[in-house]
Amino acid sequence: MHTPLIDRLRRRGYRLTAQRRVVAEVLEGDNVHLTAEDVHDRATELLPEISRATVYATLQQFTELGEVRELALDGRAKRYDPNVEPAHHHLVCDTCGLVFDVAHGIDAPGLSGADRHGMEMQGAEIVYHGECSDCSDRADDDKMAP
Ligand SMILES: [Zn+2]
Ligand SMILES: [Zn+2]
């Protein structure tokens, strides 16, 4: 079980203003991979006056603190992931962009010798690609349409 983002921020002594709290609340949960735009949309439901600039700046700060991971999957808009521990991989629907965490049992292969180019390895991320059941159902419906 991971510690909620808001608790991790609090533990670090991070000053949680109303705006920052709302951004942290919006990001809470499993399999949460929202774009900054999504975060802003949801944040305004909780705090109507929150500005886009504040949301972007707050996401930037959370990322710099290492409490949120910024993901660039597929050249789509960057996603923000509150699950930094344990490290996990992602499964992406290439059709609609739905992202799931792949958390268990998979270690990325290591690099050896010349493949490391003299670097110390710190980690690796795998992005799996697929099509979610909603998208494949939709594709089937299209095929059946006259
Ligand atoms: Zn899909
Ligand atoms: Zn994730």
Image (cartoon, helix red, strand yellow):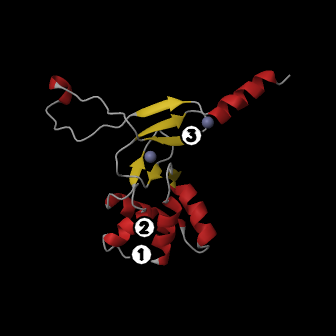
Compared to 82, does 22 lie above or below? Answer: below
Q: Residue placed at 47% from the left, 71% from the top?
A: 21
Q: According to the image, label 2 marks what residue?
A: 6
Q: What element carries label 3?
A: loop
Whether the residue carrying mark 3 lies under 8 Å from ligand 1 is answered with yes
Q: According to the image, label 3 marks what residue?
A: 97
Any part of residue 134 in sight: yes
The answer to which of marks 2 and 1 sits earlier in the sequence is 2
Residue 2 percent across, percent down from the top left: 40, 56
- Looking at the image, residue 130 sits to the left or right of residue 73; the answer is right
How many marks can you see?
3
Q: Residue placed at 32% from the left, 62% from the top?
A: 65
Q: Residues within 10 Å of mark 2 (few under 14, many from 20)?
A: many
Q: What element carries label 2?
A: helix
Tell me the kind of residue under disc 3: Gly
Disc 2 vs disc 1: Cβ atoms closer than 8 Å? yes
Compared to 25, does 82 lie above or below? Answer: above
Any part of residue 74 in sight: no
Residue 11 percent across, percent down from the top left: 32, 71
Q: According to the image, label 1 marks what residue?
A: 16
Q: How far is disc 3 from disc 2 in space, using C-alphas?
A: 26 Å
* Quarter where residue 50 is shown: bottom right
Q: Residue placed at 46% from the left, 62% from the top?
A: 56
Whether the residue carrying mark 2 lies under 8 Å from ligand 2 is answered with no
* Quarter where residue 8 is shown: bottom left
Residue 86 percent across, percent down from the top left: 34, 48
| Quadrant into which the N terminus falls | bottom left
Q: For this rendering, which residue is in front, 83 or 70?
A: 83
| Quadrant into which the C terminus falls | top right
Compared to 41, does 10 lie above or below? Answer: below
The answer to which of marks 3 and 2 sits earlier in the sequence is 2
